Image (tube, rainbow, N blue to C red):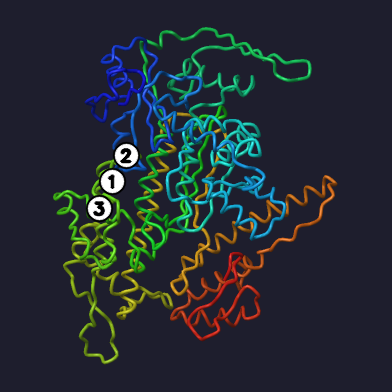
Amino acid sequence: VYVGALSLHYEALSVEASKQTTAEEIVSCIVERLGLSGSNYELAEVADESKERRLSPEEKPVSVMLLWPMHSERDFHRFYLRESQNDVPWLDNYSLDPQILRDFIPFLLQPENREYPDLCQLPDLNESTLLENLRQRFDAGHIYTYVGSILIAVNPFKFHPIYNPKYVRLYQNQKVGPILPPHIFAIADNAYYCMLKEKRNQCVVISGESGSGKTESTNFLLHHLTALSQKGSHGSGVEQTILSAGPVLEAFGNAKTAHNNNSSRFGKFIQVNYRENGLVQGAVVQKYLLEKSRIVSQKGSHGSGVEQTILSAGPVLEAFGNAKTAHNNNSSRFGKFIQVNYRENGLVQGAVVQKYLLEKSRIVSQGPYERNYHVFYYLLSGATEQEREALHLLPADKYNYLNAKNLILENCDEKYEFSRLKQSMEMVGFSAEKQRRLFNVLSAVLLLGNVEFFPKKSTYHHDESVQVRNSDVVSIISELLRVKHDTLLAALTSKRVKASGETLIMQYKLPEAIAARDALAKCLYGALFDWIVLQVNHALLNKDPTGPPHTGHSIGVLDIFGFEDFGAQNSFEQLCINYANEHLQYYFNLHVFKYEQNEYKREGIKWRDIEFMDNSGCLHLFESKPTGLLCILDDLCNFPGATNEALLQKYNTVHRDNPFYEKPQKKENAFIIKHYAGK
């Protein structure tokens, strides 16, 4: 624990502690050893010289520490002892200050006559001046730029010291606009205060191509939003003070009874005073008949820990949903929407995670410079000998589903990441038994790729059915999944078809058996990922199962793939991802152009309409019935014996005159979609 200016003799002190030791106990120990007087001290977690979080007295610092990534020049985490800052909990009093101050001055003095902080200020706005302005700002170290209320973030691929708690305070209760330079904290703060002021749910959409920094931006947003929730709504007026008084009085005066989980055990009279103009001036609370006997017969408290659970869920979802691609060593291969729920006084009440478009094809094959999902490598590197034996794990290069040329990830200790993953899972509510069952499924998925088939010997000349070559591997998989060996064997080599009211069993040919095996692996991993998200949501929603239902508002953060074009490698995943992005662009067009211009017209403002590309025709190509791309695909999937060639022929016939659809110039099994972002 670093003690900073609190001691002239020590930079830091070590404390022996268990996973059950509380922050309050550690603070008490350090204070005693330093001979400090008073009790107004607390523990803070500082990360990357930018993120800081005050630990509540009941939190377990050892459990928090086990979630930290390995130390590097960019990544460091520490605990600091500091004097309590109850009114402004996001102050930083440590040796980081000189560095922050050096960066603060140039940050605030960004030039406005060139390197415009808002692209709307450009005298001549076109693609060339827009890109040149972004480049000049980036070269000057300014990675954020506004376009009105929209924030552009250019990924610097290095650490920028502009996320310190001082920056959090700088943007508190400030409008997005010309007063302060562009920053992601401004977006988070604006969403938070709009939610409290307007009593409406807010949403932040983060979009960009792989490697553009969406995941890191999501983390900064969530960190800032949970920081604001710890601060609550200080200084936001009498109305907010009245609202904030409710939970305080409830906490001290309410209790669970036989008939009511939140029974008021005192009477209260609240007098609200108004000015002559109808504005609230103040209020007075009187209490009656507090039930004091309950003090000695009933005890109990419930620490929510929602913020810590939200932060702990990150490493779990990343391990199972992120992978190395050709452009990004930690690419999110799924989209996620995180909805943080707040009480009416601005404190976090819970959260919900929704996932979209998990890239299942990665399970069975990866590109030349790519890897499968991180969790497979963490498991194979970090499992103990006992776990390896129980899970029947092999060396990584023995699995067909892992790209043998890219087994190692630079600057990543995967053995350590496995222990960090297990700690994160424990904090999100995965018991040891649930973790064991989860790793069983992971091992089974990897082993499915090693199942081999060969043609069955038959007296019939036209019988092309297959059987499994290595039945022992199927036995291990059935043991891991707790299913019958014969049932799994039948699923890998045959399918059931209903015809004329009868169920027929049809044997797979070799290509069909391989496809069925891969489909089973993808389905298993997809179901496992859904179950993990369900467990995370269960933990986020049920930190206080006896508490009242959510009555406040929420802020949603959408982190989803940007437009993707992998050339000849484009597949069904890219079709879905680009369709989702087409919808986002439509939403953007609607809100930024259409609604805004309609409002100007309603208010009688002189206005020349801005023409923008309407992409509703492209959406119609995808989703119209009965001729949309997705509808035709659905129909053919339900048609026995349908092929890729039949699908392509149907597309070409139905959409040959559609301006958003094209056939390639040379004959090949492909089709072209004209998206808003390109073909």
Q: CA distance from mark 1 to mark 2?
A: 19 Å
Secondary structure type for disc 3? helix
Residue at left offset 48%, top offset 23%? 262
Secondary structure type for disc 1? helix
Of the numbered discs 2 and 3, the one sitting upstream in the chain is 2
Q: Quadrant of residue 401?
A: bottom left
Q: Which amino acid lies under the numbered mark 2 shown in the image of this protein?
A: Leu
633 or 679: nearer the eye? 679
Residue at left offset 37%, top offset 49%? 532
Q: Quadrant of the N terminus?
A: top left
Determine crowd level at label 3: few under 14, some 14-19, many 20+ residues with C-alpha closer than 10 A: many
Of the numbered discs 3 and 1, the one sitting upstream in the chain is 3
The spot of residue 576 in percent (x, y) is 51, 64
Q: Quadrant of residue 673?
A: bottom right
Q: Which residue carries the number 3 mark?
A: 379
Which label belongs to residue 67? 2
Residue at left offset 38%, top offset 49%? 317
Residue furthest bottom in the image: 461
Q: Which amino acid lies under the numbered mark 3 shown in the image of this protein?
A: Leu
Secondary structure type for disc 2? loop
Q: Which amino acid lies under the numbered mark 1 shown in the image of this protein?
A: Lys
Q: Is residue 15 above or below residue 342?
A: above
214 or 509: nearer the eye? 214
Q: Is residue 392 above or below residue 494?
A: above
Of labels 1 and 2, the one closer to you:
2
The spot of residue 668 in percent (x, y) is 48, 83
Which label belongs to residue 434? 1
Q: Quadrant of residue 468?
A: bottom left
